[in-house]
Image: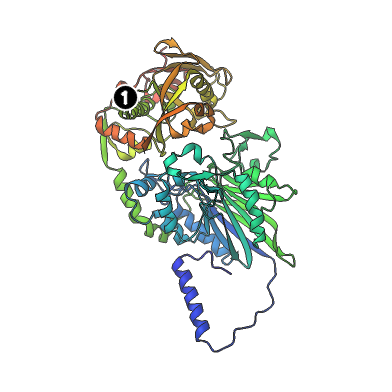
Amino acid sequence: MRLSVSLRAASLCLVGVCSLLTACDSDDPPPRPGPRDTSPRTLTLLQTSDLHTNIFPWDYFSGKADAKRGLAKVATLIKQAREANPDCTLLVDTGDTIQGTPLGTYYGLVDNAPRHPMAVAMSELGYVAMAVGNHEFNYGLDVLNKFKSEVNFPLLGANVRKRADGSEALMPFVLTDVCEVKVGILGLVTPGVTTWERAENISGLRFDDPVETARAYVPKMRAAGADVVVVAIHGGPDKQPTGSASNPDSWLADYADGSKWADRGNLPGENPAVQIAQGVSGIDVLLTGHTHQPIPKMLLKNPEGREVLLTQPNRWGSHLADVQLQVTWSGERWGVDAHDSRLHVVDEQVAADATVTQLTQRYHDTTVTYVNQKIGTTTAAFPGGFAARYVDSPLGDLINLVQEDAAREAGFDVDLSLAAIFTNDGALPAGDVTLRDAYSIYIYDNTLYVMEINGSILRRALEMNTRYFGPLDANNLPPKPEGAKAASPVVADYNWDLYSRIEYGYDLTKPVGSRLTHLRFKGAEVMDDQVFVVAINNYRAGGGGGFSMFKEGRVLWTSADGVRDYVARYMQSHQNLAPDTVNTCNFSLTPDLYTPYFGATLGAAKCAPRK
């Protein structure tokens, strides 16, 4: 049995050395092997995914503890699960590991000299493999390759190929023995990397179709002796339940029943996990990621009608996926007879692991000091969340102003800009503003593009934008602001864009596709063939969120820096920012959503309708 789950690489070396010395020093003949143990056994597969540099139970953007996240807490669950099945447990990750919080930014861009904190923590925990995610490429190949050299497990990516000759750029799969059963783990990543990532960060690489890649490699893994085949993919199901996705039973519905599932608004091929399960023979389990959902268990049928299990442990270290495989000996090889999976939840009852905490404490402390430095001031607060989305808000205008300013510095006077309020937690306080505050309003590592588009692209994007909202009745609004969002499919907050410098409005009582009430630029109606130069982030420019129309445009410039860093610099150079000065009223929603939900608590908004 290979000690795949040993906690340290050093332990592996010591075990090997001691065994070798014992064999050399002994005059006794080697013991004869006894009869092979072919009794049934249970294998445990543990999975993390989309950790996004969340080690500590801490939110760097709010500066507060968060008891429901962090690899340090997941480590406690991992060790408990190993105690339950100590000799037959494997730990796997499915990517988006080295980016996502200021911890990742600091050790990816500010000081990449030390060993990466995620490498320290994950190597301690004894992962057997990690499939790379799309965000592994955010800081370029030098940072990724350094991380790869610092962990004691392989990074997998079978569909990541060298553009020059089509050869493998990363290890495609790993075979490991556990409980005398040979487990093969195939790593795949969403091909959406090429849409979202800057070209220089993936220079010389191509990203092949994961379905076809799995179809090519699974037979090779079986031929190499794999008794159990696991696909670890940074990608998930392309649909989600139409009911409550938090209900485990909703994930067990027949995937062919269109009434039970809604499209996620993916890029073509972005989330092919179900297609792999249903279209590729020989797979036992899919460990998935990317869609940031807790999926306790999905059951799908492969081409031969055999059941394949799929699971996903959400994001940020909020869950640990636990797969139980019952395997039996057929006389020739092991095979899976039964399977089950569940998610272990990270909450207030789960303590952070002392070892992981101690090993990474200095990284955490350095990051907290870094984000708490003062960079600017405001004359009043810039509210965030729904209060900033449901009206033409100072916060939305500020992000667009930053993008326009950055484009101007690069030599482009843009006609308009578009940006989103990513989370409900980001906002700017009145008075002193820290780097953490600035980062909180732009939590992703998006870069800035300047593009040339036409009026047709703009109009279609604006119409599609309103998928964010469900059908609304001005006289019967939902009791809470989040209730105004569409329920099926649910659209992520970062897929509702706020535009600058154009005059437009929406009537949300009408169906999607006919909600845009007007669209003007400098007082004149926008024509389909009219040309605009726009500031836009790389995700949206590449069609992210289903906005494929932007791919019809022409890229004029891409930034080397992230929009988040432009926000911080702008605030440093523009002290005493005033919300009313920043705020320019150029769009409206019908019905008015700001006043009913926020007027009493936050006061009248400058751009809200007056009665």
**Where 276 falls versus 354 (above or below)?**
above
Residue, disc 1:
579
Taking the spot 65% from the left edge, 54% from the top edge, the residue there is 218
Q: Position of residue 15 (x, y in %)?
A: 49, 74
Q: Name the one closer to the observer, 301 or 155.
A: 155
Q: Where is residue 116 in the image (x, y as percent from the top left)?
A: 39, 54
At label 1, the amino acid type is Pro
Q: Measuring 48% from the left and 69% from the top, which residue is drawn there?
A: 12
- The image quadrant where one finds the N terminus is bottom right
Left or right: residue 31 versus residue 198 is right
Is 393 situated above or below 343? Answer: above
- Residue 340 appears anywhere in the view: no
Image quadrant in which the C terminus is located: top left
The local secondary structure at tag 1 comes to: helix
Instruction: Residue lying at the far top in this picture: please name it.
Output: 524
Q: Which residue lies furthest to the front in this view?
A: 165
**Who is closer to the viewer here, 301 or 213?**
213
User: What is the crowding at mark 1: few (fewer than 14 residues within 10 Å), some, or many (at least 20)?
Assistant: many
Position of 111 with respect to 353 (left or right) is: left
Q: Which residue is drawn at 54% across and 31% down?
A: 546
